[in-house]
Every structure is written in C-alpha cells, then in structure tokens.
Amino acid sequence: MNPTSQNTRLFPFVWPWRGTNNEKVRFSRLLKQKSFSITYLIIIWSIIGLLGFASTRDCDETWQLALQCDFAFWVKNLREDPFIFIRNLFTTLFLHNGFDHILFVSVLGILVIVQSHEAVFGWKITALLFLSAYVTVAPFFGVFYTIGLDYFPDSRFMQFAFERNWMGGSIGMFQVYGALATKSRKPWVLLTIPVVFEAINLSLLGIDLHISLMHLMATFLGYGFSLWLVKK
C-alpha cells in the first residue's frame, strides 16, 4: 500500500513491529521505516531520565524544572520575548509534565498513531506533519489568546492561557492522526473519535478547554494538509 492506494480499512493502524500491511519486516528495515517515531521516543524519555518531569506552573523549585519551563511554550512570550516564543515552538514538543502525560503521547500517540502513519507515508511526511503542528496550531492560539485578552481583559478563559505553559507531543500526534484518517475507507469515523474523546475529557475528566481546542484544530488541519499533500 502507498499513500495514493485505495483505502480498504476502517482503522488504518499497523502494529509497531510490522510493516505497511501488517506484514513481517526485517528489523533493519523497521528501524529505517519508523525512524522518526523511534527518534522521538528516545529523545523524550531521555529528557525524563536526565531532568525528570516538567511542570506547567512550578518553575522555581529545582533547576531542572526551571530549565524546562524556560523551553516550554508560554503565550506571554509572544509579546514579552518573540524570539523565545519562536524558539520554544521547536522545544516544547519534547517536554512532558507527568507520567500520564508521557504515556499518553508515547503509547497512544507514537506506538499507535504516528508509527502507523510513518509505515504508510514514510518518515519524512510524518515528521513534517508532526512538527508543523507547532508552527501552525501553537502560534495560532498564541495570537488568539493575546488578542483575546486585549479585547476581553476580564475573561478567565483568556487569562488562564497566560497563567501556565503548554507542552508535550499531543498536538503533533493529533495532527498526524487527522492525516492518517485519509487512509480510512470512512474518514468521518476517525475524525469523529477525537471530538467524542475531547467531549469526554471536558465533561468527565475536567481537562482544560484550551487543550481540547488545540487537539481538535490539529486533527482537522492534519486531515486537510494530508489531502493536499496526496494531491501534490
């Protein structure tokens, strides 16, 4: 199967140790085929091993927390330090603030979604889609909240975006997930799943609305971006 082949499966996922059609492949080929997923996992778990988990608010207790806060995505930096704002778009995706956070990204994100996309589309397109979420979705919301606070200075929703940092690989994984939906015979089924997932997160688990909005925007951007890439 290749990126332009007919879509026959509802859920176009493959096992992490298998090839494009869930066939057995040599280990050397597997390493090459899924090199982005492997590299990303090595980096994020190495950071945890060296520095521990980051924090969304506690930036002063240890030098490890302070260092990771310096490289996380802060909305306030758009005005206070635009250079740092741009730099951190390329670093915040490697930072995670808890065991549940990094497991969510590692297992569901990389071992299920990203490596499946990589098996079908190749590591270059997968890496492009994953990384591009941090130069599209993240800046969009940075601008949105900055302008929003200007117009609605008393809004707790706008204020909250400035009170913490934002980090992790989740928007990258959701963008790749949206792209992978183009390989389903019924893309709308796959695109509905994140909507339901985020509704549950909001209503039952109390996740921040800001996070859900970023995840959903990344999903549908990934779907549209992948359709454009296939046409190209």
Image (tube, rainbow, N blue to C red):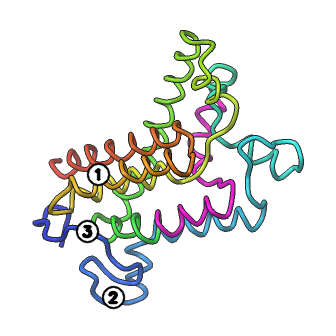
Residue 11, disc: 3
* Residue 115 lies in the magenta-colored region: no
Question: Residue visible at 82% across and 45% down?
Answer: 66
Dot 2 surroundings within 10 Å: few (below 14), some, or many (20 or more)?
Answer: some
Residue 220's place in the image compared with 50, above or below, is above
Q: Amino acid at mark 3?
A: Phe
Question: Residue visible at 61% across and 30% down?
Answer: 161
Question: Depth-wise, is mark 3 or mark 1 nearer the camera?
Answer: 1
Q: Mark 3 or mark 1, which has the lower sequence index? A: 3
Whole-percent x and y of residue 204? 52, 51
SS of the residue under disc 1: helix
Q: Amino acid at mark 2?
A: Val
Instruction: Give the residue number, with chain letter if any, for mark 1.
Output: 192
Q: Residue furthest front?
A: 204
Question: Depth-wise, is mark 1 or mark 2 nearer the camera?
Answer: 1
Instruction: Give the residue number, with chain letter if any, for mark 2.
Output: 25
Q: Is residue 166 visible?
A: yes
Q: Is residue 67 left or right of residue 139?
A: right
SS of the residue under disc 2: loop
Whole-percent x and y of residue 230? 19, 52
The residue range painted magenta reads: 83-109
- The span from disc 3 to disc 2 (Cα, nearest Å) is 21 Å
Q: Mark 1 or mark 2, which has the lower sequence index? A: 2
Kindly indicate the quadrant of the structure image that contains residue 215: top left
Q: Are the residues at dot 3 and dot 1 in contact (C-beta closer than 8 Å)?
A: no
* Residue 96 lies in the magenta-colored region: yes
Kindly indicate the quadrant of the structure image that contains residue 7: bottom left
Q: Are the residues at dot 1 and dot 2 in contact (C-beta closer than 8 Å)?
A: no
Query: Split into 4 quadrants, where in the image is the N terminus?
Result: bottom left
- The span from disc 1 to disc 2 (Cα, nearest Å) is 32 Å
Compare residues 185 and 5 and report the one nearer the observer: 185
